[in-house]
Amino acid sequence: MNDLPSQRPVTADAGTKLSRSLTPHAERRIEHPGSAKNAKVFPMAIDKISATDKGLPKRTLGSSGMDVSAIGLGCMSLSGTYGSSDDDQGIALIREALDRGVTLLDTSDAYGNGHNEELVGKAIKGRRAEVVLATKFGNLGGRGGRVADGRPEYVPIACEASLKRLGVDVIDLYYQHRIDPTVPIEDTVGAMAKLIEQGKVRALGLSEARPETIRRAHAVHPIAAVQNEFSLLYRAEAEETLQTTRQLKIGFVAYAPLGRGLMTGAVEDLKGLAETDTRKRHPRFAADNIKHNLSLVHGVEEIAHDHHCTLGQLALAWLLAQGKDIVPIPGTKRKDRLIENIGALAVELTADDLAQIADSIPVGAAAGLRYPEGQMKSLYL
C-alpha cells in the first residue's frame, strides 16, 4: 500500500490490527477547480473498515480513563448548520455510526437551540451503554451582546436542561463551549466540578480555550479534554495548545478536522452551498480565499492517490498520526461520508508522508480567518 515499504509505517493507531475491506476497482471522481475536463479519477478509498471483536481502535481522553473510538462523530450538521437536515435521516446516521463502532458522539445545547441534543437523545435511546456522550454549554453566539455565559449559577441550570433534552441521567463529558471573559475560569470550573460530585457529569472539558486558561481550569479540577479546531489548514493554535494539554495529560478533541469540508476537495465555490449553509459567511470560503485554499488541498492529491484514499481520508489519517491523544470528530449528514471518514483509520502513512503533507500545507498557509470577524473575539480565550 505504501511506495516506501522499507520505512516503518505510521498508522492511525499503531499496534491495532484492523480488518479492512478494500474496493480497488471502485472509483471516486475528484475534480480540480476549473472545468470537468481537468478532473482526475482516483481509486475509491478504503471505504469500509469492519470493527474487530473489540470495536474500532480506541483512544483515551486524557487521564479520565474514558476510552473512545479513535474517530468520533460531530453531530452539529444534523441540526441545519450546513443547510437543511432531516431528523429521521440524522437519527439513522447516528445509529449507523454506532453500528460501525463509533462511540464518541459530540453535541451542544447551542446546536439548533437544543434541537441537536434532542435528536442525539432519540438516536441513542436503548443504546446508551454504547456511547461516550459529550455535550457543551455556555455558547451564546452574541445574544444579548454576550459571547458566553460561564456564571457559576448558570452551570447547573444548563446541565439540567441538557440532561432532559438528551434523555439521560449523566453526561460523560461536559464542556464549557465558549470561555466567558467576564467570569474567572476558576469559578466556572468550580461549578462544573460540583456536577461530578452530584453524579450528573463524569468528566469536564473546555472548548476554544487557550493554554493559560486550560492551566488555570485544570488546577481547580482535572480537565479530561480540550476541544479546539484542528486540521491541516487551520492548526497554529491547536499545535500551541497541544504543548500544554500533553504536559497536563489532557486529551485533544479536534473539531472541524476537514476544515469544514475544504479538505475533501468537494466544495469548489459558494454556489454549491445551500442558502442556509453557515459556511457562506466563513472567510475561508470567500471567492479569493477558497481558490487559494483549494490549491493547497490539491497539492496533496497525488499522495492520496498513492495511498488509494480520498483527500478527506488523507487529512484525517495525517491528523490521527499526530498523536494518540488526538480524537477527530468529523461531522456529516451522509452515510457514504461517514463510512469514508471511518476508513481513514486504515490509511497508513510513513514519517516521510507526514512530513511531505505538512510541508505541502504549511502552518498559517490557509487564507481567511477561522470564523467571521465578529465571532473571532469569542475564540481561544
Image: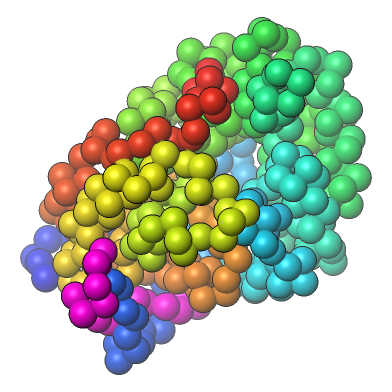
Q: Is residue 174 left or right of residue 324?
A: right
Above or below: residue 356 compared with residue 372:
below
Query: Which residue is more in the foreground, 62 or 367?
Result: 367
Color encoding of the figure = rainbow
Q: Residue 25 in magenta?
A: no
Residue 155 appears in which quarter of the rendering?
A: top right
Name the residue rendered at 36%, 61% in the picture.
268
327 and 68: which one is in front? Answer: 327
Residue drawn at point x = 79 percent, y = 58 percent: 119
Q: Quadrant of the N terminus?
A: bottom left
Q: Is residue 12 visible?
A: no
Residue 142 shows up from this direction: yes
In the depicted structure, whether residue 154 falls above or below residue 357: above
How far across and down, in percent of the image, does residue 151 sit?
78, 15
Give me the residue at 67% from left, 62% from top.
Answer: 84
> For residue 157, what is the image quadrant?
top right
Depth order, front residue of 229/279: 279
Percent position (x, y) of residue 191? Answer: 79, 18
Q: Give the total number of marks visible in the rendering.
A: 0
Residue name at image x 88 percent, y 38 percent = 161
**Magenta-colored span:** 32-51
Question: Vertical placement of 61 versus 179: above or below?
Answer: below
From the viewer's perspective, tell me whether residue 58 is left or right of residue 197.
left
Q: Position of residue 302 (x, y in %)?
A: 17, 67
Please provide percent x and percent y for residue 175: 67, 33
Apparent side of residue 184 relative to residue 311 in the rendered image (left or right): right
Q: Is residue 345 above or below residue 206?
A: below
Residue 38 among those drawn in magenta: yes
